[in-house]
Amino acid sequence: MMKVFARGIAFDGKHGVYEEERRDGRHFEVDVEVSLSDASSAESDELNETLDYRHLAEIVVEVAQGPSRYLVEKLAGEVVRLVLERHAQVEEVCVEVRKIAPDVAGSPAWVGARLQRRRSD
């Protein structure tokens, strides 16, 4: 099994529960990792035998620029759904969405959610 990933995809988005988050926006980062059933690209060195990681980043940007969402969980779910819909060779996908420097007690560096789903789920 081959794993392909794109990590630290950054964007500013107007997502969040609170009015100021939706009005002013926040900084987010996303990691996407997929498992492919076919690992032949490891031998062939052919891009058409794998999933180009640019497609993963494009899906993240599409979701980021789409409708405002309240929860990072929903953003992760939308990325997972689109990856599985558009790329039949993906057997499993894991998406982590991080909201950077949220206005939360204790000043965490980031908060977020991770969603992992198999095509068979």
Image (cartoon, rainbow, N blue to C red):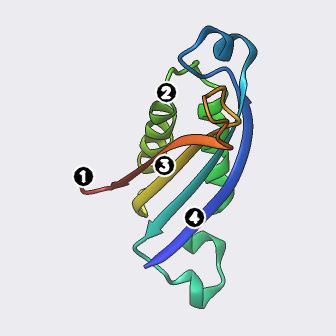
Q: In the drawing, does residue 72 fall left or right of residue 106?
A: left
- Which of the two discs, 2 and 4, labels the residue nearer the N terminus? 4
Q: In the drawing, does residue 84 fall left or right of residue 46?
A: left
- Which of the two discs, 3 and 4, labels the residue nearer the N terminus? 4
| Figure check: 26 above or below 3 | above
Residue 111 at x, y percent in the picture = 57, 40
- Badge 4 marks a residue whose secondary structure is loop
- Which of the two discs, 1 and 2, labels the residue nearer the N terminus? 2
Instruction: Please report the residue visible at 51 percent of the width from the left and 72 percent of the height from the top.
Output: 3
Instruction: Please report the residue visible at 42 percent of the width from the left and 41 percent of the height from the top.
Output: 81
How far apart are the two marked residues, 4 and 1, measured between alpha carbons?
21 Å
- Mark whose residue sits in front, 2 or 4: 2
Other-residue count near label 1 (Cα within 10 Å), few / some / many at <14 / 14–19 / ≥20: few
Return the residue at label 3: 83
Q: Are marks 4 and 1 in contact (CB under 8 Å)?
A: no
- Badge 1 marks a residue whose secondary structure is loop
Residue 116 at x, y percent in the picture = 39, 53
- Badge 3 marks a residue whose secondary structure is helix
Q: Nearer the viewer, residue 67 or 87?
A: 67
- Which of the two discs, 2 and 3, labels the residue nearer the N terminus? 2
Other-residue count near label 2 (Cα within 10 Å), few / some / many at <14 / 14–19 / ≥20: some
How far apart are the two marked residues, 2 and 4, measured between alpha carbons?
28 Å
Q: Are marks 3 and 4 in contact (CB under 8 Å)?
A: no
The amino acid beneath tag 4 is Leu
The amino acid beneath tag 3 is Val
Return the residue at label 2: 71
Q: Quadrant of residue 4?
A: bottom right
Q: Are marks 1 and 2 in contact (CB under 8 Å)?
A: no
Instruction: Please report the residue visible at 56 percent of the width from the left and 71 percent of the height from the top.
Output: 50
| Figure check: 102 above or below 53 | above
Return the residue at label 4: 51
